Amino acid sequence: MAADLKLKDLRYLVAVAEQRHFGRAAAQCFVSQPTLSAQLKKLEQSLGVQLIERVPHRVALTPAGQEIVARARRILEATEEVVTLARAHRDPLAGQLRVALLPTIGPYLLPHVVPAVRRSLPRLQLRLYEYQTATMLEKLHAGELDLGVLALPVELAGLEARELYREPFTVALPERHPLAAHPSLKVADLKDEKLLLLEDGHCLREQALEVCGRAVRREEQDFRATSLETLRQMVATGAGITLLPELAGRGAYRSARGVVLRPFARPAPVRHVGAVWRRSTARRAAIDALCRLISEHAA
């Protein structure tokens, strides 16, 4: 006799696998812990196999549980795709769109784009996240995101991409730095400077090294920033120079105390910012509309 599988039980199982804690998994699923525990016991009885090892202060999956969780995730993703597809056919520019941006893109792009989305796509609800590239691609593949905005190129197995805009780099200098007197700079002008960079894992770090690597003789080895704003503050102290994307020097960020921004002479080095999504997505119309807005307002 076939087991009577319910989607909610699979959601409970996946939540326990993610949280490794019954209480947190219950909270994630908006049920009480006794309810979640009882339903998982029934699921194990229905399947005739133990899925979870229950020991004090620890929750672990059995080998069977690990295999079933992997398939449960795919089932839940497919179910969500069915619901999303139906909703998209009713109104393709309405509903929730889960969008992730790099930490070096989101804070500087969103102030230009979100007001335009509210005006042009009032029925579309953006659910926004910040992730670095590897995590973003992982969550796109897992169906936890609809769209990623990141620096291209990236590995596209099972994904599609389009370029949204090209963003020049600028040089951030201490305001009393001799190079601040120049209206624009060449990469060769930076050869004797101490370069401040983001920590490993940020693609902007690799891009800055690619731009400056041959010209700049030294990187500040004792410092790794976690954000562009930390870099900006370190430049203001005179600790070194850094490269910032052009959008990070607009608006409220233009007049940061103690820092001046100088463009590169043409042709300026740029980063290619693009959008990435699953080929199987049911939200293509909403993705296309949002991408058009981003391209228009990032310019």
Image (cartoon, rainbow, N blue to C red):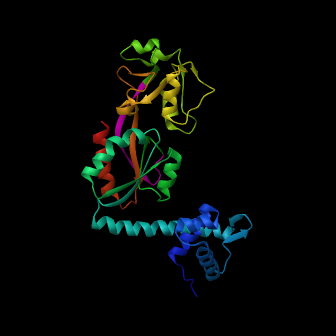
Q: Residue sitting at 62 percent across and 66 percent down?
A: 23
Give the percent coordinates (x, y) of residue 188: 46, 16
The one of 157 and 267 positioned closer to us in this rendering: 267
Q: Residue sitting at 43 percent across and 52 percent down?
A: 159
Relative to 289, say whether 105 is above or below: above
Q: Is residue 158 magenta?
A: yes
Residue at the extreme bottom: 1
Give the percent coordinates (x, y) of residue 2: 56, 85
Q: Which residues are magenta?
A: 155-170
Give the percent coordinates (x, y) of residue 27: 56, 66
Q: Is residue 222 visible?
A: yes
The one of 23 and 190 positioned closer to us in this rendering: 23
Q: Quadrant of the N terminus?
A: bottom right
Give the percent coordinates (x, y) of residue 67: 62, 67
Residue at the extreme right: 56
Relative to 269, say whether 122 is above or below: below
Q: Quadrant of the C terminus?
A: top left
Q: Is residue 14 visible?
A: no
In-image side of 224 versus 244 (left or right): right
Q: Is residue 219 magenta?
A: no
Q: Residue sitting at 62 percent across and 81 percent down?
A: 42
